[in-house]
Image (tube, rainbow, N blue to C red):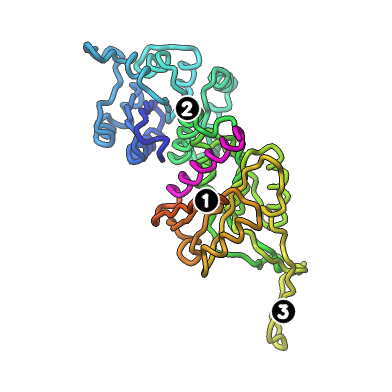
Amino acid sequence: MSVIKGSRIVLGVSGGIAAYKAADLASKLVQAGAVVDVILTPAASRLVGPATFQALTKRPVYSDVFVPWTETWFGHISLGHDADAIAIAPATANTIAKLAHGLADDMLGAVVLSTQAPLLFAPAMEHDMFQNAATQANLQMLRDRGAVQVGPETGRLASGEIGNGRMVSPETIISAIRLALGRDGPLAGHHVVVTAGGTQEPVDPVRFLGNRSSGRMGHALAQAALDAGARVTLITAASGQPVPFGSETVRVRTSQEMLIATTNAVESADALIMSAAVADFRPRESAGEKIKKTSGNSGLTLELARNTDIIASIDRQGLVKVGFAAETENLFEFASAKLREKHLDMIVANDAESTIGSPDSTAQFLFPDGDPVNLPRLPKEEVAEKVICHVARLCRQRIHG
């Protein structure tokens, strides 16, 4: 999470029962390398104490707007000026109303009025409070001023009811913070299309031909592109990976669906990163009903048809194309051949057996010109960041010749 590492985040915690989740959020931000200053509203202090956040952040926790100033630190003014982003989680109906109308009767309101940093808020309240016309008007007022609303989601609420008012996960809030921090990154103003996951080619209504791809690399690439300021379209066949906040997500299942979605998306794109594990073949015919075992049936023969090679089929002038090659033998030779034959600007070569389905990857970057780049075994998130650095470079070269 290089975009978060070293950033200064003000975390405002208001007095909803979801305040206990803010401790997990603070912990995850610190683990990602952020400097976190926590502000508790008076109501929040009755639900979770400052000692919890002090232990997690190793920094003072603020609640009183009249905290003493020093010669170099000016309370709410310094907190607001030094912040790279302000996230309020949970944001109760009361806090949302106060911020919408510019009230500064506590430390959180004063800091929000003192900052030019992006403001994000994660609403959390009972369903009827969230749907109330006053709350909706206040939310709209904040969005109109550029604040980013994150959630809420539908789920079990403190009352035991199921409704729309549950605070989103800390991971989603962190993804939104990353989006805000990366807005002026090296891919700002660029549209990047990323494909992810392994396609499924139906044999019958309950069976399919597929592979072990988890989609983790593709989703990490989408997040890294967002961190770099890009507008991202994520075309994904993965079902178990979190979707980065701010991405335009298209869910597909088959190679044909991915072909159509990708062809449409690249019409307005500057770069295509084809990390999906697309099936090379599909059953020529898919049975309409579940195929049954019978006593006289000793086996099953499937006739396969070749799928379209998606990245090779896309030939739009000015589009940066990045492919992936997962091989079990002759990695460099096979990846180099794909680089040439598919007219790619870059290919990421992986050992299939140790990479597919794993959280880590060994990778080699190959280019039409220049020396290969060899990476040690790294988490896929770190590999994704390095891929995006090269994509940004290739986009700049394409623009400037």
Along the viewing direction, whichever of 128 and 90 lies nearer the viewer: 90
Give the CA separation, mark 1 to mark 3.
33 Å
Q: Residues within 10 Å of mark 1 (few under 14, many from 20)?
A: some
Question: Is the C terminus in the top left, top right, bottom left or bottom right quadrant?
Answer: top right
Q: Which residue is mark 2?
A: 121
The relative height of residue 114 versus residue 252 in the rendered view (above or below) is above
**Residue that sits furthest to the bottom in the current view:** 296
The amino acid on which the numbered mark 3 sits, given as a three-letter code, is Thr
Label located before the other in sequence (1 or 2): 2
Asked whether residue 176 is in view, the answer is yes
Q: Give the dominant element type of the magenta stretch: helix, strand or loop.
A: helix
Label located before the other in sequence (3 or 2): 2
Q: Which residue is mark 3?
A: 301
The residue at 72%/53% (across/down) is 313
Question: Is the N terminus in the top left, top right, bottom left or bottom right quadrant?
Answer: top left
Q: Which label belongs to residue 387?
A: none
The amino acid on which the numbered mark 2 sits, given as a three-letter code, is Phe
